Amino acid sequence: MDRSFLVLAASEGEQSAAELLFPHWSELIAGIIAFSIVYFFVWKWVWPSMTKTLENRQASITGQMEAAEKARAEAERLLEDYKAQLAEAKSEANRIMEEARTSAEQMKADLTAKAQADADQIRAKAREDAESEVARALTEARSQVGEISVDLAGRIVGESLDPAAHKALIDRYLADLERL
């Protein structure tokens, strides 16, 4: 690299190193004027439109961020509503299940009580039927015993006995037997 610099310096002739580093005044003034013109055009037309575009983009991004924040807040509100409705539905389901359980227990108790009452009624009717059957059987047995006794006594004695008197005697005898 040093050689190329030396070759360039030798080709220029006897110029000093300072002249090689700094441009001539005419080139410097032309560069400054050209830079000023380009800077003026950029400052006058490009910079405002670029600023306007950046401001529009910033406003758009800000609007999108606000919309996203509103959407997030709405989503959170809907989530809270959903959670509240879910909790309410769960409590309602628990309440309905508890009511159903209570109703089933009440129905079971009612059916058990009804079955017990029916069973008691059937037992009472069976007792009544048995007692009436026993009473009927006793009545029938008394009348048969009385008739047999009168008939037997008539055969033994050989005469006909008064059935009414013997019946009264037999009834007293049976009543004495029942007391024992």
Image (tube, rainbow, N blue to C red):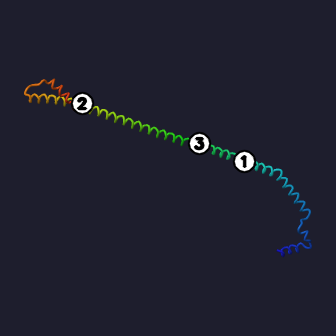
Q: Amino acid at mark 2?
A: Ala
Question: Who comes first in sequence, dot 1 or dot 3?
Answer: 1
Q: Quadrant of residue 6?
A: bottom right
* Mark 2 neighbour class, 10 Å CA radius: few under 14, some 14 to 19, many 20 or more: few
Compared across the picture, whether 40 is left or right of 81 comes to right
Q: Quadrant of residue 24?
A: bottom right
| Picture disc at residue 62 | 1
The percent coordinates of residue 127 (x first, y second) are 29, 33
| Picture disc at residue 6 | none
- The residue drawn where x is 80% and y is 51% is 47
Compared across the picture, whether 84 is left or right of 158 comes to right
Compared across the picture, whether 101 is left or right of 41 comes to left
Q: Measure the C-alpha gap from mark 2 to mark 1.
A: 107 Å
Along the line of sight, the residue nearer the viewer: 58 or 74? 74
Along the line of sight, the residue nearer the viewer: 58 or 170? 170
Q: SS of the residue at dot 1?
A: helix
The percent coordinates of residue 75 (x first, y second) are 63, 45
Q: Measure the C-alpha gap from mark 2 to mark 3.
A: 75 Å
User: Depth-wise, is mark 2 or mark 3 nearer the camera?
Assistant: 2
| Picture disc at residue 135 | 2
Q: Amino acid at mark 3?
A: Ala
Q: Amino acid at mark 1?
A: Thr
Q: SS of the residue at dot 2?
A: helix
Question: Who comes first in sequence, dot 2 or dot 3?
Answer: 3
Residue annotated with mark 3: 84
The percent coordinates of residue 120 (x first, y second) are 34, 35
> In which quadrant will I find the C terminus?
top left
Q: SS of the residue at dot 3?
A: helix
Residue found farthest to the bottom: 3
Instruction: Judge whether 119 appears above or below 67 on screen.
Output: above
Query: Mark 2–mark 1 contact, CB under 8 Å?
Result: no
- The residue drawn where x is 74% and y is 49% is 58
